[in-house]
Image (cartoon, helix red, strand yellow):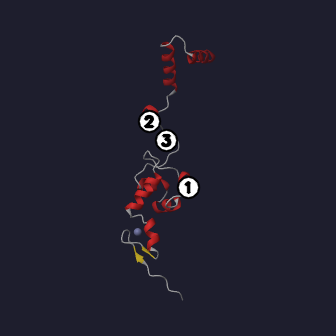
Amino acid sequence: MRRKAKAVVCPRCGKATQRPTAHEQVCLADPQNVARWRAEMDDGDGMAISRTEWQSQPRSVSDDYLSRSYGGWDNAARALGLKPFRKGAPAIGLNAPLSEAERHACARRAALETDYHLSYRREAAHEASLD
Ligand SMILES: [Zn+2]
């Protein structure tokens, strides 16, 4: 019978491991790992990238490992201090898309403040088509 290698207890997380060197790279309690994963997962704006984007290039750890370890991709993002990934997250402030009423008001304003405005003619034609 083959003897198993003696388990070593990780000083950071207390997990017993037979491959301490490999464990160091994925230990959840190692601040260096957490900082590296956070940097890799940050979309540059404090929001996590999608899991698909994570998979699109070589990473220091697999998306499966992070998801399994933290109980889901969104939870991994939260644990790393990021907002969970949301497709088409609403733009806010000046980047927010105009509502229909705002678009209409802007078109009117532009039409009133210039002698001639192409979109004003389109607006007028559109309004006429509604009558
Ligand atoms: Zn550990």
Question: Which quadrant of the figure has residue 30?
Answer: bottom left
Q: Secondary structure at mark 1?
A: helix
Residue, disc 2: 92
Residue drawn at (47%, 53%), measured in percent from left and top?
A: 41
Estimate how packed mark 2 is, as few (under 14), some (14 to 19) or many (20 or more) residues with alpha carbons within 10 Å: few
Q: Secondary structure at mark 2?
A: loop
Furthest residue toward left: 11
Comparing marks 2 and 1, which lies closer to the viewer?
Answer: 1
Q: Quadrant of ligand 1?
A: bottom left
Measured in 3D between alpha carbons, the distance from the residue under mark 2 to the one under mark 1, in whole angstroms, is: 28 Å
Residue, disc 3: 89
Residue drawn at (36%, 68%), measured in percent from left and top?
A: 12
Cβ atoms at labels 3 and 1 below 8 Å apart: no
The mark that comes first in sequence, 3 or 1, is 1
Residue, disc 1: 55
Cβ atoms at labels 2 and 1 below 8 Å apart: no
Furthest residue toward bottom: 1
Q: Is residue 117 above or below residue 17?
A: above
